[in-house]
Each structure stands twice: as structure tokens, then as C-alpha cells.
Image (cartoon, rainbow, N blue to C red):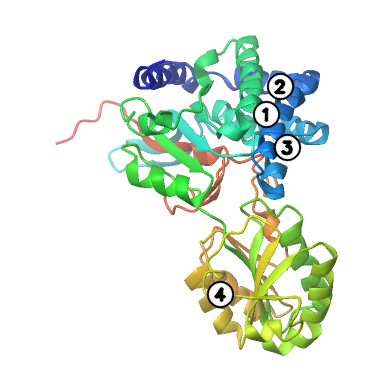
Amino acid sequence: MKTASYVTRLGLDAREAGYQLATAPSILKNKMLTSLARLLRERTEEVLAANTEDIRAAEEQQLSNAMIDRLRLTTERLEALAGSVEEIAALPDPVGQVSQMTLRPNGLQVGRMRIPLGVVAFIYESRPNVTIDAAALCVKSGNAVILRGGKEALHSNLAFATLTSKALTEAGLPPKAVQVVETTDRAVVEELLKQKETINLIIPRGGEGLIRYVDENSQVPVIKHYKGVCHVYVDKDADPDKALAIAMNSKVQRPGVCNAAETLLVHQDIADRFLPAFIKEARTCSLELRGCPRTCAYNPEGIVPATDDDWPAEYLDLILAVKVVDNYGEAVAHIQRYGSEHTDVIVTENYTTAHDFIRSVQSSLVLVNASTRFNDGGQLGLGAEIGISTTKLHAFGPMGLEHLTIEKHIAYGDGQIRE
């Protein structure tokens, strides 16, 4: 297979399918999604068998436990995925929505209409469930999509490709509207980045190296889904019990995902009441702490001294950097210096401090008294997400249906001409 011609064909097929999908009625798109949810349930064993091959290979390659967890599919996770697809089907179709109609002095009625982006190339790593989320969101929003997953999830992704193709066919929609790249050849990514004639948008989602490579080499517009250096700040006016639950959930519920906390900041006035209990709780789940000198003083033998490399780190593992700060201002300054504008949390009972934190921290989701794990399309009512954009363009934060469309201007006249 010649990579260049293969990728060119992917793009041409996607563009043709995208033309048809852009004007497809909602009833057909929803029929596809309903069929896909049904197939996920009916063919669970087939998908799990493919996933087992990926897990076996990952274990042989000695990938981390967190990476294997991201890769693993289960009956429960597939059921949740089917439910997510059904939620997307139930959402209003953004395509064709008209807004901001105004009457100009010359009688023209001017407004805006939502339209699909066209063809999206989605380049991602690990989590195979993302394949279904991306396919469902793109179909509902009228976009054709080319999915290039990581080599570690190839069997799972190809199994999902079979289901999406069947669901599209059952709904009378072009099967090429969703295409999964069938090779792990890295040259495919290089070629995808050149397809400016057929691809409208590239979305990279994965490790820092992948995103930097795509951003620096793409001839197609890119929306980055950059690393999640997420913070939990425990303010002096925090409820210690609430802070303990939020900090632990933010880090350990799923440590290998981008919205897991990577740094815990603790105000010095609450450190004596909070940190001993937190350190004790961390020990029960084998959470490695890397602390500043003041943090290490609470448990000199059990906490690894932090280095300058720990503050901007995205561990994606059971590792957490911990720093005691002198005041609220130092906490915000730390987040602004080391954060990735992904997800940041303040735990406090002080309304004024909470409000100032929301205004001062410019991340895609800023939370008060809640876990970082809520920065997720499903949790925020978007049905699902294609990823969490850290690029401040038309989309910032979880990208759901509306963020996979743009607005064009429309105008209704009655013979007006410009003088």
C-alpha cells in the first residue's frame, strides 16, 4: 500500500461523504446513532475479543497500569458507551439552526446558520472508546471523520469501524462518512497533515509529543487538545473533609486521563488540618506524593522531594505533586505559571475568594468545590466530547456537537441592490 495514495483516497472519500452528510435530515442521523448503540450491545463479545488482543500486546510491551486502564474495554464501559451514543441522538441537531436574525434599514434580513465543519481528521492515542464518541458526534453534527488511533488500540478500533460502517449503511448514509485508518504506519499522520484540499480541521488528542508534532507540521488548521496539568487548590477557608474527598477523587478515580489532577496546592493556614489526613489517605491507594519541603516535613520518609520538573508535569499515573503556598495569590500565580489551561479547582467556603478564582484562572473549566474529573462532555451535558480543546479559538474546553459546527451568515432580500 502506498501511503500517500491511501491517505489521498481517504480524504477524497471523506469529502464526498461529507457533502451528503451535511444535508442529511436529523431522522437519518439519529437512526444511525440508534443502530450503533444497538450494535454495541449486540456485538459486545466481538469487540471485547478484539480489545483482548490489544491488552495482551500492551502487557507484553509493559505499558503502565494507567495506560492499560485507558485501553481496556469492559461490558460496563461498552454499555456506558452505548448510552452516550443514545444521549447524542437525543440532543437537538445544531445543523441548520438559525440565530440572530435582524432587519437592516434597507429591508435585508440578516442572520446566522450553523453548518458542519466538513471533514475532520482526528489523530489520537490509547482510549478506543474515543473512536465511538468521535464517530457519533461527527455524524450528528454532519461532519465526515477520518479516525487515526494509536497502534496500541488498532484491533479495538477496527472492530468499532465495522459497527459504525454497518450503522451508517442501515441508516442510508454514506459508509465513508466514518473511516478508521487501517494501518499503524506513522507516515499516515504525516500525509494527513498535508491534505488541505480535502480536510478542514485536524484534532490531535494524546501525548505532548504527538500534539506538538501535529501543530508544528500541519498544513491544515489544528485545534489542540493539549496536556492536562490540572490543579486542586485547598484554600484557607476550605472544609477539610470536602477538600479531602475532592482531592482524592480528582487524582485517583482515573489517574491516566487528562482531567485527573496532577498538582495539589494547600494554603499554609489549613495545611496542619488537611495534609496529615490527605497523606494517610494517599498511602491507602499507593499514591506517590512529590512534595515541596514544607509538605515533606509532614512525612519525611514517605514523600519524595519535588523537583522543578514536577510542577509542569502531566504524570497520567498515581503520582501527585504537592505544594504548600503562603497565600491565595501564590496559588493563582503557580497555576498561571505551570498550568496548561485545562482544568483547575478551588476548594473554599469563601464566596469572594471563589469568585475571584473563577475570574483569575483562565482554564477551559474552572470549578468551585468539585472534582477536576467533571471536565467531560458527558458530565457537562454535551452528550459526549471529541476532546477537550485547550486552543482558544471557536472552541475551548469539551468539544461537543455545537463545537463541531460553525456559523455562516445568511440574508433574505426582496430585490435589494447596493448603490
Which kind of residue does numbered mark 1 sit on?
Ala
The span from disc 1 to disc 2 (Cα, nearest Å) is 7 Å
State the CA–CA distance, disc 1 to disc 3.
25 Å
The image shows residue 36 at horizontal and vertical percentages of 69, 21
Q: Identify the residue position indicated by label 2 in the image.
A: 34
Do tag 2 and tag 4 residues touch (Cβ < 8 Å)?
Answer: no
Residue type highlighted by circle 4: Thr
Q: Which residue is mark 3?
A: 72
Q: Which residue is mark 4?
A: 307
For the residues labelled 4 and 3, the Cα–Cα distance comes to 32 Å
- Amino acid under disc 2: Thr
Question: Contact (CB < 8 A) between labels 1 and 2?
Answer: yes
Marks 3 and 2 sit apart, C-alpha to C-alpha, by 24 Å
Residue 385 % position (x, y): 60, 41
Query: Could you say whether the residue bearing mark 4 is in a helix, strand or loop?
Result: loop
Crowding at mark 4 (Cα within 10 Å: few <14, some 14-19, many 20+):
few
Give the mark nearer the N terminus: 1 vs 4.
1
When asked about the image quadrant of residue 115, the answer is top left
